[in-house]
Image (cartoon, grey):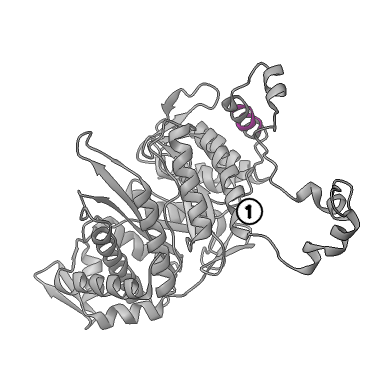
């Protein structure tokens, strides 16, 4: 995506943004952190500008790879030295029923069922906060959602807390259930600044709480070109990159060596309809951001194919295909938010199942194929000769079962077989596969015990 010259220009422009415009800091605690550094200067009480040297220092401090564990202490992957990892989520307000496409307010039952689905799909390495619970006390909704997540899966968690006042109680809940979280961190809190160029109080204060516990964190921004960022892709990229560097500096001033994952969710704005949306430029910016983080040697989290489609439909499929394939071919580290439609308002289990198939094919595509004497097999070609066939050759007998992709959703039907089967619609198979997976939900053995213990603590709040 980016030439060395382009990387240098974009990095240099980001430094200019930070040295000439800077960042507004809304947290008194964060202001104290910035005042401790000679590389940061204040313009008034809240606005800070950054010397280039402090940014280069912060880049050197941050680890280039981060170990991510499951809650049983097993190392699952090493972000920054690994292929693209995917997860399901994130913070959807509604749930799309797989059988009917009916859209309902997201509930605790939907959360549990969706986590069970994520457990059954091997291409998803993490579970992100899937939805905002609408059927429990709002003052405890985030805690209940977090409890359902941690009890319902052993996979690593990316957590997004919608009510900032519930963030620290959420970490206390996890410590109550599992003890010290820093020994094998399986929880990765996710934070956003307010674009353009504001480090808001909730984000800063909860970053501090996480860093104090030695948790890896994601610092990711959401920019809307023509609204919160410049209309041009280059301008949007430079501004978002500057925000990421500011968040990096903050994290390293709090504790040098803090494991931080950086990335952007760039979108565009339809001025006629007054809605944000994703398009091919989003994918390009996602890949460019991944390459910039690779240049900095900092782990990356990016877009996940969240769509403006209406569920698992043609609109969503084009976004998923472009996003997942380009992520696997590029340098994208973590894509943690698969399954959202209607602009990330609605969680669609059928979309999750369909995306899983795309991820598998994208990974197979990205691997390429071997070229060596063993696979070329000239001896077999000589044996078959001109006009022969390879259907019974030794190589075919050995390899045919795994030589190509086999869909777990869609059967291979000839025209005649499709007509004999009363011309089934592809969605029929997708719905059936989704329901089969959801009916086979595989929860950890300690789910009931953790729910009981966690609900007791939440009831005391």
Label 1 element class: helix
**Residue 110 in the image, given as x and y percentages of width and height:** 50, 33
**Residue with the most extreme left position:** 44
For the N terminus, the quadrant is bottom left
Q: Main secondary structure of the magenta part?
A: helix
407 vs 292, left or right, is right
Say if 242 sits above or below 229 in the image.
below
Q: Circle 1 sits on which residue?
A: 364
Q: Quadrant of the C terminus?
A: top left
Q: Within the image, what quadrant is residue 287 found in?
A: bottom left
* Front residue of 3 and 147: 3
Viewer-side residue, 206 vs 356: 356
Answer above or below: position of 264 versus 79. Answer: above
| Residue at point 56%, 38% (across, down) | 354
Q: Please tell me in which quadrant of the rendered image residue 319 appears.
A: top left
Q: Residue at x 21, y 71 (%)?
A: 18
Span of residues in magenta: 431-436
Q: Which residue is found at the position 29% from the left and 77% from the top?
A: 55
Residue 402 percent across, percent down from the top left: 76, 50
109 sits left or right of 47 in the view: right
Q: Position of residue 444 (x, y in %)?
A: 65, 45
Number of marks: 1
Residue 411 in sight here: yes
Asked if residue 304 is among those painted magenta in the image, a careful observer would answer no
The image shows residue 199 at horizontal and vertical percentages of: 24, 61
Q: Is residue 452 visible?
A: no
Q: In the depicted view, which residue is nearer to us: 445 or 236? A: 236
Up/down of 303 relative to 339, above or below: below
């Amino acid at each position: 995506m980016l030439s060395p010259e382009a990387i240098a220009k974009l990095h240099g422009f980001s430094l200019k943004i930070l040295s000439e415009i800077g960042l507004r800091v809304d947290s008194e605690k964060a202001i104290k952190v910035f005042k401790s550094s000679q590389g940061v200067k204040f313009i008034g009480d809240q606005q800070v500008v950054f010397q280039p040297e402090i940014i280069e220092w912060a880049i050197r401090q941050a680890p280039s790879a981060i170990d991510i564990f499951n809650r049983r202490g097993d190392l699952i992957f090493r972000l920054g030295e690994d292929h693209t990892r995917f997860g399901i989520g994130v913070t959807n307000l509604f749930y799309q029923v797989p059988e009917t496409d009916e859209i309902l307010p997201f509930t605790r039952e939907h959360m549990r069922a969706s986590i069970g689905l994520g457990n059954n799909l091997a291409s998803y390495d993490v579970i992100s906060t899937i939805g905002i619970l609408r059927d429990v006390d709002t003052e405890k909704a985030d805690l209940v959602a977090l409890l359902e997540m941690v009890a319902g899966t052993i996979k690593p968690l990316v957590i997004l807390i919608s009510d900032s006042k519930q963030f620290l109680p959420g970490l206390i809940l996890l410590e109550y259930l599992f003890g010290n979280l820093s020994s094998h961190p399986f929880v990765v809190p996710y934070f956003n600044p307010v674009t353009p160029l504001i480090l808001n109080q909730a984000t800063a204060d909860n970053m501090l709480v996480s860093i104090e516990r030695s948790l890896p964190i994601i610092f990711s921004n959401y920019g809307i070109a023509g609204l919160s960022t410049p209309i041009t892709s280059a301008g949007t990229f430079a501004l978002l990159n500057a925000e990421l560097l500011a968040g990096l500096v903050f994290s390293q001033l709090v504790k040098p060596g803090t494991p931080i994952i950086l990335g952007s969710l760039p979108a565009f704005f339809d001025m006629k309809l007054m809605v944000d949306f994703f398009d091919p430029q989003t994918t390009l910016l996602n890949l460019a951001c991944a390459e910039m983080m690779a240049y900095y040697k900092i782990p990356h989290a990016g877009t996940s194919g969240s769509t403006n489609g209406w569920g698992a439909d043609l609109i969503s499929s084009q976004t998923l295909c472009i996003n997942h394939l380009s992520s696997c071919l590029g340098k994208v580290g973590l894509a943690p938010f698969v399954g959202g439609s209607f602009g990330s308002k609605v969680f669609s289990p059928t979309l999750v199942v369909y995306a899983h198939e795309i991820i598998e094919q994208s990974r197979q595509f990205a691997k390429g194929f071997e070229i060596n004497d063993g696979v070329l097999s000239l001896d077999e070609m000589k044996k078959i000769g001109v006009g022969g066939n390879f259907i019974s050759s030794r190589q075919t007998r050995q390899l045919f079962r795994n030589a190509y992709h086999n869909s777990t959703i869609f059967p291979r039907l000839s025209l005649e077989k499709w007509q004999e089967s009363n011309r089934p619609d592809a969605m029929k198979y997708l719905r059936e596969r989704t329901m089969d997976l959801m009916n086979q939900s595989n929860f950890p053995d300690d789910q009931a015990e953790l729910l009981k213990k966690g609900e007791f603590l939440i009831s005391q709040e």
